[in-house]
Image (cartoon, grey):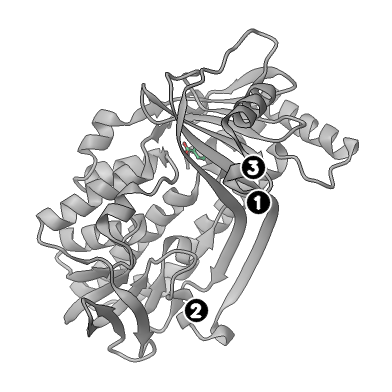
């Protein structure tokens, strides 16, 4: 097969890139190791920055998001048993939307397929070749045979565990990592919302987060040991911990319901530099990971792709490589801002096992500052809304 851009991975980055390239008249082929059903059902994040919402809407894939997503104009920080609102919209003029990542995936897959886009699911053993030549190749197994895509460029959008990043020789990669000594236990629950806005709770027993998906389905998280197994968290323990960590002195109540999905999420910060090797460009989780506390992961992927798509379009329209040359530095500037913000939120809100009472007091002092200083609240708000 021949195409202009071979895209490895049909996550939000790969699908949106393919969609934006198509709108600009550039041809691509997307390969994905999982099935369409699998990518459309995997539960991931849910917070879209205003810029993400605007890009999806302007590019024609925002109709269902506008109808079914929820616009939030603030978030709640809860600590020492009290709630404090960060008025995102008042402080920044922007808002966020809660709309699940797998819904974004469904919208993008259907837009690509309706436009006759080539998405190849369930491909196995993908390998990238000749990345430092003028015609890089992607080879893989599909339906029992070997296939190859020859392209002008390859976009590595296949996530943290994908093949794209390790295809860059290690001497050309600089990696920065931090692993956190805790994870998040995430559940989906059949229950009405307990709150109109997301609640980020600091508690001496560990962090908890109340998010939402729809008027009938809520998304809740609590800090856990990353080595925990699902079976060490029976329903009664989950509810007990959530009630304790979210307890307030003002009579607020968490609505319980049937838990129908559960999973443990590792917490990691990671960046690779640069985002380019020869004719391979990395975008999204293949290039960087943030802990979910800042709700930045999907938004960073979208930003990478916004910059990368326009660089590719510029190249194919005018022959100029200026955008491609600037891609890595330009995307990384935003990545590192989000890395810092996500690390800061994570450090401020979680319990670390080596925490001393001194560190606990420092966290409370920092939280208190965020909710009592307008300057500090704006810092949080403008990073949160993007
Ligand atoms: C979610 O709804 O899944 C969610 C919300 C906020 C976060 C992370 C995840 O910071």
Q: Give the quadrant of the N terminus.
A: bottom left
Spot occupied by residue 365 in the image (x, y as percentages of width and height):
79, 30
**In terms of secondary structure, where does tag 2 sit?**
helix
| Residue 171 visible in this rendered orientation of the protein | yes
Q: Which mark is residue 226?
A: 1
Seen in the picture, residue 38 relative to 76 is either above or below; the reply is below
Seen from the viewer's position, the closer of residues 82 and 334 is 82
Label 1: few (<14), some (14–19) or many (≥20) C-alpha neighbours in 10 Å: some
| Residue 47 horizontal side relative to residue 336, left or right | left
| Residue 291 visible in this rendered orientation of the protein | no
Cα distance between the residues tagged 1 and 3: 12 Å
Residue at which label 2 appears = 166
Who's the residue at 19% across and 71% down the image?
317
Residue at which label 3 appears = 232
Seen from the viewer's position, the closer of residues 92 and 44 is 44
Cα distance between the residues tagged 1 and 2: 25 Å
- Circle nearer the viewer, 1 or 3: 3
Spot occupied by residue 268 in the image (x, y as percentages of width and height):
61, 56
Who's the residue at 49% across and 23% down the image?
197
Q: Which mark is residue 132?
A: none
């Amino acid at each position: 097969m021949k195409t202009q851009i071979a895209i490895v991975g049909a996550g939000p980055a790969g699908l949106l890139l393919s969609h934006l390239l198509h709108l600009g008249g550039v041809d691509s082929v997307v390969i994905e190791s999982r099935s369409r059903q699998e990518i459309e059902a995997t539960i991931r994040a849910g917070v879209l920055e205003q810029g993400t919402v605007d890009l999806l809407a302007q590019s024609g894939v925002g109709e269902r998001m506008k109808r079914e997503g929820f616009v939030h104009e603030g978030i709640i920080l809860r600590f020492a048993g009290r709630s404090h609102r960060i008025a995102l919209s008042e402080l920044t003029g922007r808002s966020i939307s809660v709309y699940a990542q797998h819904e974004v995936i469904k919208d993008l897959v259907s837009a690509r397929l309706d436009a006759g886009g080539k998405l190849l699911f369930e491909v196995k053993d993908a390998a990238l070749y000749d990345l430092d030549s003028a015609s890089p190749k992607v080879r893989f197994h599909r339906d029992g045979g070997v296939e190859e895509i020859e392209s002008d460029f390859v976009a590595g959008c296949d996530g943290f565990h994908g093949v794209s990043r390790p295809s860059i020789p290690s001497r050309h990669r600089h990696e920065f990592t931090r692993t956190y000594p805790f994870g998040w236990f995430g559940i989906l629950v059949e229950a009405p919302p307990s709150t109109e806005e997301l609640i980020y709770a600091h508690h001496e027993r560990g962090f908890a987060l109340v998010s939402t998906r729809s008027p009938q389905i809520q998304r809740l998280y609590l800090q856990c040991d990353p080595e925990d197994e699902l079976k060490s968290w029976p329903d009664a323990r989950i509810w007990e911990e959530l009630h304790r960590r979210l307890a307030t002195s003002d009579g607020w109540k968490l609505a319980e319901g049937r838990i129908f999905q559960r999973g443990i999420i590792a917490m990691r910060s990671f960046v690779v530099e640069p985002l380019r090797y020869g004719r391979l460009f990395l975008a999204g989780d293949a290039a960087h990971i943030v802990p979910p506390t800042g709700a930045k992961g999907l938004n960073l992927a979208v930003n990478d792709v916004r910059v990368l798509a326009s660089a590719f379009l510029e190249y194919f329209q005018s022959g100029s490589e200026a955008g491609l040359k600037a891609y890595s530095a330009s995307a990384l500037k935003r990545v590192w801002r989000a890395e810092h913000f996500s690390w800061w939120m994570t450090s401020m809100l979680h319990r670390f096992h080596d925490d001393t009472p001194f560190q606990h007091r420092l966290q409370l002092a920092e939280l208190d500052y965020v909710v009592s200083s307008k300057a500090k609240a704006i810092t949080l708000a403008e990073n949160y809304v993007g």
